């Protein structure tokens, strides 16, 4: 035995040396608390560590959870003798002590921890080889209804023990659509969205699933796996809308009253009601069990009125049944999420006869004509009943119970029993006899009666025609220049129908003798008097004598059998006397267009006028301030007599005078506008006076100045296009000019060697017109010393500025003049004061003193 032990120690020592455990500090060291991690399943006789003993220690002792696996040699070599199993023990707690030669502990014991690290050496296993469950159709997708569970002895904190669930097979598989899904981490089975919508126990009452579980999170090809079978029964969905409920209105039974119920497929649902119509009063509730109650008596008429108001405000489709309450029942889970779609609940309120008929107004007024035929409708009395339409509760009867007055007899009217239409029963009415009737009508349903009141007004008919007071208003002579708007004649007709009605109102029309519409007739609405008025100027030349015929008629049509006759017509003769009138131009403004360069004597336009009396006309011009035109006195043709210039004025406006030859020599005036079109007749020029151009002397570098050109000709929308060049070849050594755009150019110096003086640079500008014109302009440019960027010029006597001596003389003269003026004013004041004193004394002698 001793030999065997020595041999074993020798082998361990050789292994220790071969594996490099002899490195100080890494695989060996002093005795102290330590922790080691070792994978399970490794080969036995593996050295873990070598502890070094400090004298007087000569050997080591191992105690604790060794399980006869862990050993220590006298030299301090800690090792294990067989493979470790994490599932048996995941941690071994050991103690190591150092002993002297007598076996006494001289150091320690210190704790040594051996952690067994996991390897994937266990396959996952389902807790059951077969699972069974059930699910309701239309259950919420994603809500678990069954769990499958598997275990794995490997460390769950490592991938070795991380399980991954998966549905491998679904039977039956319809249209290749999965109806079920599984949470790959928890094993929770639920419906997919398609399964929630399509599961139907009538078609497939059961399904079978094959579910696999893999370790390593299902991510490794070397994962271990297991399978199980799941049988699922599909049960009918009980989350269904109940049948519509009917409730009698104004019930006197104790409330609340259970009226229906809803149930979710599983217990524990939280129920609530949602008012679809947003009513001001919602008389329903639901309890935790899904029972629905009405909490107070219902009123059909109230619900009907609210529904119609809501319909009006929303402008939506018409409410199909206003007396029905429509709301929703909702089921939610413990987290407040809806379990399924809401259920629509209908509660119809049954009507009872609890409303009397109501009249449309306190008094209903109808009108009937005098000649109304028997049986004709006078009007319809429409009473209302708030009870349900088209039922016995709202079915109304009408009866006339009284007629006032009973003249010429009682029973003049009748009313249709169910329609409420009033008719004339016995004879036609006469307004002269009785202008108004009052009826009392009883309106009743099967339980209630109401009295309504009707007023019938007898209205006059248009059975009388207007009659003129005389048929001929004689002759009327007027001058043709009588003012428009003048009243020239008063006519009168009368009508025997009721005053101030459409039957008696009279309108006058001129039906003959005034085709030009020069006359009109206004009617006084109170007296029916007609006033004949001039609406357009009279004209002797067109109509010297007119025979005017009037007709008087009513705005209301005459009754059948009555017609207008000669009594409704009248006439008079209008005689228009001649008045000499001025000529009349054919236009208020005459206009012509010519080019501004037309030759002198060219005809540029003409005017025309006529004299109403046919006299000859003589034309003349007025306002020809430039003397450009002349007019032919006979023909009205206008000619140029001098060169025209568009730039001087276009359009050129003059007045044309037409004067009658003979008679009173009356005249009229019109306008003649001559529009001159442009020709290129103005050479270019500078746009402004460039007298302040300068360069600071001496020049440090070549400089430049910008200038602008223009001309007086007309330009198109794109503007002028001038070209620029130097006006003399001798300037080219010192200057150059370059175009910037169509109107601006830049003058630049070619060097810096200029004298301190003024230079005049000639610039040639061409307008590019047809024909082209050009002009040479002068640009004065000063070279001068500058102070703060401005040209400096020494002060000296300049024309118009007085010298110092002249200024002193002017000042003394001004002071002398002021002195003389002051002296004169002073003397004048003294004289006036002395005069006032004398006058005052004289006045004192004449006037007595007053106390």
Image: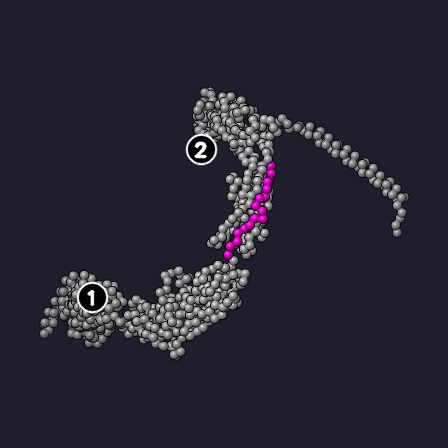
**Residue drawn at (53%, 61%) of the image:** 431
For residue 444, above or below residue 778: below
Question: Which quadrant of the view contains residue 289?
Answer: bottom left
Circle 2 Cα neighbour tier, 10 Å, few/some/many (<14 / 14–19 / ≥20): few
Q: Where in the figure is residue 463, as x and y percent of width and height?
A: 51, 54
Q: CA distance from mark 1 to mark 2?
A: 83 Å
The reply to whether residue 120 is visible in this rendering is no
Quick one: 551 or 519, which is closer to the camera?
551
**Residue drawn at (40%, 78%) of the image:** 252
Q: Where in the figure is residue 213, as x and y percent of width and height?
A: 18, 66
**Residue drawn at (47%, 53%) of the image:** 561
Residue 361 as seen in the image, left or right of residue 838:
left
Q: Is residue 763 magenta?
A: no
| Front tag of 1 and 2 | 2
Question: Which quadrant of the view contains residue 373?
Answer: bottom left
Q: Where in the figure is residue 602, as x and y percent of width and height?
A: 50, 22
Q: Where in the figure is residue 566, as x and y percent of width and height?
A: 53, 47
Circle 1 Cα neighbour tier, 10 Å, few/some/many (<14 / 14–19 / ≥20): many
Under tag 1, what secondary structure?
strand
Under tag 2, what secondary structure?
loop
Residue 835 as seen in the image, left or right of residue 423:
right
Mark number for residue 165? 1
Quick one: 565 or 688, which is closer to the camera?
565
Q: Which residue is mark 2?
A: 717
The N terminus lies in which quarter of the figure? bottom left
Magenta segment range? Answer: 461-479
Q: Is residue 466 magenta?
A: yes
Quick one: 364 or 477, which is closer to the camera?
477
């Amino acid at each position: 035995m001793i030999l065997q032990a020595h041999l074993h120690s020798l082998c361990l020592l050789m292994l220790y040396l071969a594996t490099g455990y002899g490195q100080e500090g890494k695989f060996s060291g002093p005795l102290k608390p330590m922790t080691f991690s070792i994978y399970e399943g490794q080969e036995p006789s593996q050295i873990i560590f070598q502890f070094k003993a400090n004298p007087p220690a000569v050997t080591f002792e191992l105690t604790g959870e060794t399980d006869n696996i862990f050993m220590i040699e006298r030299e301090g070599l800690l090792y294990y003798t067989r493979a470790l199993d994490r599932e048996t023990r995941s941690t071994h707690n050991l103690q190591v002590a150092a002993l002297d030669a007598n076996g006494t502990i001289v150091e320690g014991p210190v704790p040594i921890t051996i952690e067994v690290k996991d390897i994937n050496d266990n396959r996952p296993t389902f807790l059951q080889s077969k699972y069974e469950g059930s699910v309701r159709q239309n259950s919420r997708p994603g809500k678990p209804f069954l769990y499958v569970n598997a275990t794995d002895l490997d460390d769950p904190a490592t991938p070795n023990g991380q399980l991954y669930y998966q549905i491998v097979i679904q039977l039956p598989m319809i249209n290749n659509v999965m109806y079920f899904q599984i949470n790959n981490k928890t094993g929770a089975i639920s419906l997919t969205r398609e399964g929630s919508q399509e599961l139907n126990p009538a078609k497939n009452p059961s399904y079978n699933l094959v579910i696999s579980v893999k370790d390593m999170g299902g991510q490794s090809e070397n994962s271990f796996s297991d399978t199980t079978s799941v049988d699922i029964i599909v049960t009918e969905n009980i989350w269904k809308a109940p049948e519509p409920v009917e409730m009698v209105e104004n019930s006197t039974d104790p409330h609340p009253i259970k009226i229906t119920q809803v149930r979710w497929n599983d217990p524990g649902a939280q129920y609530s009601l949602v008012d679809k119509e947003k009513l001001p009063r919602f008389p329903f509730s639901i309890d935790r069990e899904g029972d629905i109650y009405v909490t107070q008596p219902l009123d059909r008429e109230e619900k009907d009125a609210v529904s119609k108001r809501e319909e009006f405000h929303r402008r939506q489709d018409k409410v199909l049944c206003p007396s029905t309450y429509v709301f929703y029942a909702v089921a939610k889970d413990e987290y407040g999420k809806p379990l399924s779609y809401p259920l629509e609940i209908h509660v119809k309120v049954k009507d009872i006869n609890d409303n009397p008929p109501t009249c449309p107004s306190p008094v209903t007024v109808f009108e009937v004509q005098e000649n109304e035929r028997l049986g004709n409708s006078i009007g319809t009395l429409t009473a209302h009943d708030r009870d349900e339409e088209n039922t016995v509760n709202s079915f109304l009867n009408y009866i006339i119970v009284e007629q006032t007055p009973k003249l010429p007899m009682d029973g003049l009217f009748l009313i249709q029993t169910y329609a409420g239409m009033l008719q004339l029963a016995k004879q036609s009415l006469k307004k002269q006899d009785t202008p108004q009737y009052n009826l009392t009508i009883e309106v009743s349903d099967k339980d209630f009666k109401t009295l309504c009141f009707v007023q019938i007004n007898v209205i006059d008919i248009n059975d009388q025609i207007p009659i003129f007071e005389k048929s001929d208003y004689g002759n009327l002579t007027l001058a043709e220049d009588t003012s428009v708007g003048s009243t020239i004649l008063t006519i009168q007709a009368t009508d025997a129908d009721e005053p101030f009605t459409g039957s008696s109102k009279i309108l006058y029309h001129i039906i003959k003798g005034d085709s030009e519409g020069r006359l009109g007739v206004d009617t006084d609405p109170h007296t029916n008097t007609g006033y004949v008025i001039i609406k357009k100027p009279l004209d002797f030349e067109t109509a010297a004598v007119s025979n005017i015929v009037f007709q008087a008629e009513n705005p209301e049509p005459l009754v059948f059998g009555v017609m207008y006759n000669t009594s409704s017509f009248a006439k008079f003769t209008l005689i228009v006397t001649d008045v000499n009138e001025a000529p009349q131009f054919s236009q208020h403004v005459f206009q012509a267009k010519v080019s501004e360069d037309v030759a002198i004597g060219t005809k540029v336009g003409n005017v025309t006028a006529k004299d109403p009396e046919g006299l000859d006309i003589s034309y003349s011009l007025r306002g020809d301030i430039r003397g450009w035109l002349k007019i032919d006195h006979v023909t009205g043709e206008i000619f140029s007599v001098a060169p025209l210039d568009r730039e001087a004025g276009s359009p050129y406006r003059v007045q044309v005078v037409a004067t009658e030859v003979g008679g009173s020599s009356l005249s009229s005036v019109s306008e003649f506008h001559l529009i001159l079109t442009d020709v290129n007749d103005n050479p270019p020029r500078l746009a402004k006076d460039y007298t302040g151009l300068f360069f600071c002397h001496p020049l440090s570098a070549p400089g430049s100045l910008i200038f602008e050109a223009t001309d007086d000709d007309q330009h198109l929308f794109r503007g002028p296009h001038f070209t620029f060049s130097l006006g003399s070849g001798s300037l080219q050594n010192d200057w150059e000019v370059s175009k910037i755009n169509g109107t601006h150019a830049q003058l630049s110096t070619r060097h810096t060697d200029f004298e301190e003086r003024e230079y005049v640079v000639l610039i040639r500008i061409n307008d590019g017109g047809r024909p082209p014109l050009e002009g040479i302009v002068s640009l004065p440019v000063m070279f001068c010393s500058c102070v703060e960027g401005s040209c400096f010029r020494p002060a000296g006597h300049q024309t118009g500025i007085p010298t110092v001596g002249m200024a002193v003389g002017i000042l003394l003269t001004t002071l002398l003049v002021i002195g003389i003026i002051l002296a004169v004013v002073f003397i004048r004041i003294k004289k006036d004061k002395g005069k006032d004193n004398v006058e005052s004394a004289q006045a004192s002698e004449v006037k007595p003193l007053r106390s």
